[in-house]
């Protein structure tokens, strides 16, 4: 499995997590909107070039890690994020 590097771009009311896979210029993204202590995860996009490597899962894990660290809750509006929450009942306390 290739190394996946996650970065976070916080632009106040909106933000994105970016995933870069070693050896590729393609970038996976998880976008969100922030309203106080609630983050609405609205879209996850992983280009075909880097698909099938767990990129989307790593993006969601980064969001969940930050939610625990910084004390915000998540609305999983994106279908992928919603599915990830169903697979991880231990994240239920983070659902807004």
Image (tube, grey):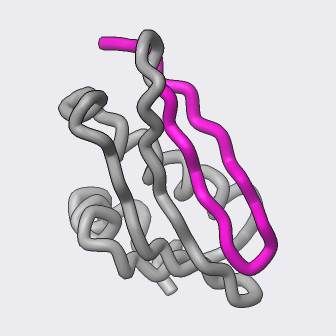
Image coordinates of residue 30 in percent, x first then y, are: 47, 57
| Residue at figure coordinates x 27%, y 63% from the top left | 80
Relative to residue 44, is residue 74 depicted above or below?
Answer: below
Relative to residue 94, is residue 89 depicted above or below?
Answer: above
| Residue at figure coordinates x 48%, y 72% from the top left | 41
| Residue at figure coordinates x 37%, y 13% from the top left | 2
Question: How many numbered marks does the figure carry?
Answer: 0
| Residue at figure coordinates x 43%, y 75% from the top left | 42
Relative to residue 36, is residue 65 depicted above or below?
Answer: above
Relative placement, left or right, of 53 versus 90 is: left
Q: Looking at the image, which is closer to me, 36 or 9?
A: 9
Residue 6, image quadrant: top right
The question of residue 32 being in magenta is answered with: no
Relative to residue 30, is residue 37 depicted above or below?
Answer: below
The question of residue 9 being in magenta is answered with: yes
Relative placement, left or right, of 60 versus 67 is: left
Q: Looking at the image, which is closer to me, 1 or 20?
A: 20
Specify the farthest residue to the right: 12
Q: Looking at the image, which is closer to me, 16 or 85?
A: 16
Residue 13, image quadrant: bottom right
Quadrant in which the N terminus appears: top left
Specify the farthest residue to the front: 25
Q: Main secondary structure of the magenta part?
A: strand
Image coordinates of residue 7 in percent, x first then y, are: 65, 39
What is the magenta range? 1-20
Q: Looking at the image, which is closer to me, 12 or 48?
A: 48
Image coordinates of residue 4 in percent, x first then y, are: 47, 24
Image coordinates of residue 16 in percent, x first then y, are: 60, 58
């Amino acid at each position: 499995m290739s190394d996946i590097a996650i970065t976070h771009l916080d632009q106040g009311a909106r933000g994105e997590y970016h995933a870069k896979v070693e050896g590729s210029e393609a970038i996976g993204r998880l976008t969100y909107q922030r309203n106080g202590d609630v983050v609405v995860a609205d879209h996850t996009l992983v280009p075909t070039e880097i698909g099938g490597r767990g990129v989307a899962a790593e993006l969601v894990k980064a969001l969940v890690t930050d939610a625990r660290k910084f004390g915000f809750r998540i609305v999983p509006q994106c279908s992928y994020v919603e599915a990830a929450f169903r697979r991880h009942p231990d994240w239920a306390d983070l659902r807004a």
